Image (cartoon, helix red, strand yellow):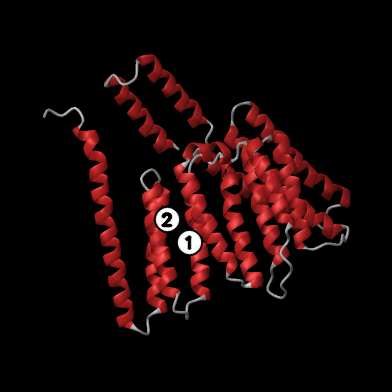
Amino acid sequence: MASYATRLKTDIERWRAAGLVDATTARRLLEDVENTGRRGISFGAIVAMLAALLLGAAILIFVAANWQALPRLARVGMLFAVILSGYLGGAGLRARGQNGAGEAAYMVAAAAFGASIALIGQMYHLSGDEAAALLTWCLGVGLAAILLRSPALTAAAVALSVAWLWTDSWDFWRQSPLPWQWLVLAAGLWAVSLWTASRAARHLLLLAFVGYVCLIYLHGERLAVPVALAVASALFLAVSAAREAASERILRLGGGAPVHGLIGFAVAMMLIQAEIVDDPVFMLAALVTFGGCVAALMLAGRDSRALRWCAYALFTLELGVVYVATVGTMLGTAGFLLAAGLILAAMAAVIIRLEKRLLAPATGRGAPS
């Protein structure tokens, strides 16, 4: 955010000097940049949040180490004191404009709440498993996020929901049914993220949804699941890139929607190729993956550095997958890479010619004849 704001301020000053905007408009734009930048969490606030989490962990470890020496009432009282101190102290800090420190105090209280579930359950021998404890922790943190309107607590609730999903659906010894209730929980957390203005939570939810589809595939190993994910992700990328303003009004991600489409497409294509690695159509899937990288760069690569890096990473990863899959036939690998290189070179030549033709009228307009 800081680097973007700095570049934008420089551009506004350049526009004002060139006469593109007047002084009043330039001042209002600079004020908007300043106000928007203050809502972000700085590096110092992140360090403060990490320090607060470490402090909270130290307090909880101290309580746990002296657990047997403390009376039951004192145990419960200390735990609730840490929770109340974190939430009330965080609210006071935010009221004084110290948002980063306030969010850090909230995270201490959330960590104390999770520890309280485990310690009180152990003390009173309450029945339940890890998944139920994680769900309770998630719901409690989500409720606190609603009441305190905290972006950090909302993101923490999303992370806890993912931990509950994994714990409840998969472990080393048994395979449990995939909980469809997570979709309902995710929809609720999305609504909470809109209320608390937590972009991080919405980004995490989109990534978690891709993980949920992967769990569906792992439970049934049906090829139709990653195929559907690949198609849906490609459509999501195309629509969010073509209708950027509309998608931003709906999703409120602060940019980056096409990146999630590319990530979903990449995960789906990796699952598909792992399933058909010994099938002749493997090469077709590889070509589709390479084509998806190029299409993503053409649609949204100009304005998104994150998408460019993801596309480059996917292209490199796909080259490695193709090499490993065809390592027994070096000639076949060389032929595939040669064909892919020629196809991409031809596509690049076509794109360059189209760009020149599209730019020619604009640059030639007004030129002397």
Q: Depth-wise, is mark 1 or mark 2 nearer the camera?
A: 1
Cβ atoms at labels 1 and 2 below 8 Å apart: yes
Q: Is residue 365 above or below residue 241?
A: above
Q: Residue furthest left?
A: 369
* Quadrant, the N terminus: top left
**In the picture, residue 360 is in which quadrant?**
top left
Q: Is residue 309 above or below residue 87?
A: below
Q: Who is closer to the viewer here, 288 or 129? A: 288
Mark 1 is surrounded, within 10 Å at the Cα level, by few (under 14), some (14 to 19) or many (20 or more) other residues, namely many
Which residue is label 1 attached to?
A: 266
Q: Residue at x 33, y 29 (%)?
A: 11
Residue 348, can we see it?
yes
Residue 122, percent from left and from top: 83, 60
Under circle 2, the secondary element is helix
Residue 86, percent from left and from top: 70, 39
Residue 296, percent from left and from top: 41, 53
Q: Which mark is residue 310?
A: 2
